[in-house]
Image: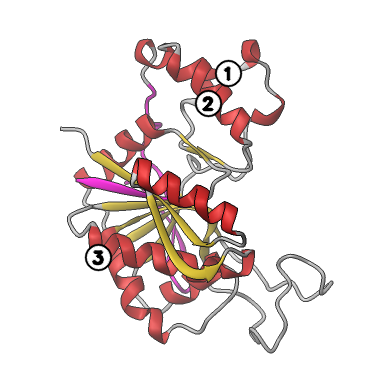
Amino acid sequence: MAPRMRYVFVLGAAHTTETQAAVDQESEKFKDIVQQDFYEAYHNLTIKTIMGLEYAVKYCPNAKFVLKADSDVFVNVPLLMSYVTRKIKAKSFNSIFGHCNVKHSPKRWPKTNKWYVGRDEYNQTAYPQYCQGGKYLLSMTVAAGLVRVAPDTPFHKLEDTWIGLAMSLTTFKNKHENLFRFTNYNFNAMQPLSVPCNSVLRTLTTHKTKMSAMKLVWDKCYKDKWLYNNKPKLPPAGVIEMDNDGVIDSNNNDTIPLLS
């Protein structure tokens, strides 16, 4: 039986009463909002991520996996179902899967850079390995483990870096998967007749995608039943596995909450 899925949108407090009223209306209609009393801001993403993990662990304890995705990430849900089914069969419950960096250093200059981190915030020359924060899949085992070590993990304003710091306190693994694309298929410039459904539907996620482009791909590749005549297939199993010391090895290897 295919996995079932539940999705929620994780939010901080709105900056205006009008926006909050719209959020309340959405929540009342669709029951898909998880909100906490911190303001929406880029450097509050770590707080938001911890909140999302806590929600998943508390309210979806029987789930096998959690997918965290930003609002500008296109998720190929049918392929995600196939991917998760394979991970469940392989009992891959001790890893985060995504677009994982081998090595990354803090940006020290200029101070106006979005990802600037001063030495008073983080005094090491390199971060632990981590998966790029736009989208990653983690087992509920890992999610629960990260929630447990959260109080002992130094706060960091860059949420994916914080996940790496928390992971370094565990024995869990970061595993790079090419299915989690950092860039996109130039979705934002596509016209209806140029959407490459065959390629798009063999990619699990694409980042930096406008809402209008997501709808275009949905209408062309899903709504028009292209999907049902051309089932997306996973490529042969194969990931790059990184442990918390940076060692890289080749490794062939029922509800999913989607946190957006």
Is 92 left, or right, of 79 in this rendering?
left
Position of residue 128 relative to residue 66, above or below, is below
Tell me the kind of residue under disc 3: Lys
Please state the horizontal and vertical placement of residue 53, each as a whole percent of the image.
36, 64
Which residue is depicted at the point 40% across and 12% down? 225
Tell me the kind of residue under disc 1: Pro
Which of 89 and 49 lies nearest the eye of the viewer? Answer: 49
Disc sitting over residue 58 in the figure? 3
Residue 247 appearing in the image: no
Please state the horizontal and vertical placement of residue 49, each as a whole percent of the image.
46, 64
Q: Quadrant of residue 104?
A: bottom right
Which residue is depicted at the point 64% across and 29% down? 187
Q: What is the CA distance from the residue labelled 3 to the residue labelled 2?
A: 34 Å
Along the polypeptide, which appears first: circle 3 or circle 2?
Answer: 3
- Number of the front mark, 3 or 2: 3
Residue 257 part of the magenta-drawn span: yes
Position of residue 85 relative to residue 49, above or below, is above
* Residue occupied by mark 1: 196
Quadrant where the N terminus is found in the figure: top left
Along the polypeptide, which appears first: circle 3 or circle 1?
Answer: 3
Position of residue 135 relative to residue 12, above or below, is above
Mark 2 nearby-residue class (10 Å; few <14, some 14–19, many ≥20): some
Is 52 left, or right, of 255 in this rendering?
right
Which of 235 and 78 lies nearest the eye of the viewer? Answer: 78
Q: Which residues are magenta?
A: 232-260
Residue 111 part of the magenta-drawn span: no
Mark 3 nearby-residue class (10 Å; few <14, some 14–19, many ≥20): few
Mark 1 nearby-residue class (10 Å; few <14, some 14–19, many ≥20): some
Disc sitting over residue 200 in the figure? 2
Q: Circle 2 — which element?
A: helix
